[in-house]
Amino acid sequence: MYFFLLNLSPLDLGCISTTLPKSMANSLWDTRVISYTGCAAQLFSFTFLIVGEYSMLTIMSYDRYVAICKPLHYGTLLGSRACVHMAAAAWATGFLYALLHTANTFSLPLCKGNAVDQFFCEIPQILKLSCSNSYLREAGLLVVGVFLAFICFIFILFSYVQIFRAVLRIPSEQGRHKAFSTCLPHLAVVSLFISTGIFAYLKPPSISSPSLDLVVSVLYSVLPPAANPLIYSMRNQELQDSVWKLITALFQ
């Protein structure tokens, strides 16, 4: 688990570093300018990191499944070599997916201006600027990406169904608590990541507005990576005690 967390941490840091610094700089200088190359680099980096993070979270659900449901086979199924291979696959998936989408998106002719109605460059906003007949190829790639993401979601869901079934069969309450404590941080991170992403891209058009789209984009691009370290750190008893003392002091 800690090996995969070690891989998840730079992905979280990268997601925030790709979008926020440029947005903050533009706010300070009261401008919304970004170069064509900078926009392509930002889109590639964000897509690479967000896909890599989702892939890593999917792998971590398998790690929790093996640890809870097949503990005697854990060393065989998830040895050091297997962990390295799976982590490398997550990074490679993000890189290839980002490369494909970036090359395809920026090969489209932009016929509707050059103003991206967002605080960072993302694929749907750039497609709105392309010619009406030229974005279908990229839209098809997005549909394939959504389908693959749905398969990962089903895999995560299946893993946790099996995990909860196994945990509920543990006779001792202490054993159930220990098993749940190893899974709940990951489940919280996955739920936050998926729920904000679904709301950002699948919300009804009737409630869509520029201000709401901006808030939702901040939620799915900034909130999950920023919250992940806090969620996982709360497993540390010393940190829990410190947070509890801080909350108690505030309300006294």
Image (tube, rainbow, N blue to C red):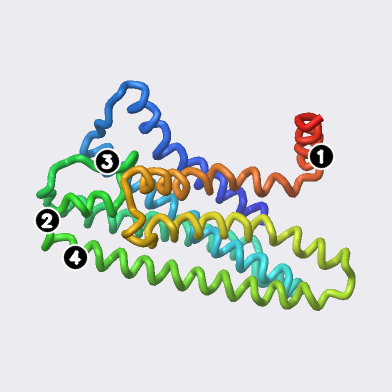
Tell me if 102 is positioned left or right of 174 in this view.
left
Q: Are marks 2 and 3 in contact (CB under 8 Å)?
A: no
| Residue 131: mark | 2
Disc 3 on helix, strand or loop? helix
**Residue 21 is drawn in which quadrant?**
top left
Please tell me which residue is depicted at 71% across the width and 73% down the height of the picture: 164
Structural crowding at the residue carrying mark 3, measured as other residues with C-alpha within 10 Å and reported as few (<14), some (14–19) or many (≥20): some
Closest to the observer, 121 or 82: 121
At label 1, which amino acid type do we have? Asp
Tell me if 128 is positioned left or right of 22 in this view.
left
The residue that mark 1 highlights is: 241
Please tell me which residue is depicted at 33% across the width and 53% down the height of the picture: 208
The residue that mark 4 highlights is: 136
- Nearer mark to the viewer, of 3 and 4: 4
Disc 2 on helix, strand or loop? loop
Q: Are marks 2 and 1 in contact (CB under 8 Å)?
A: no
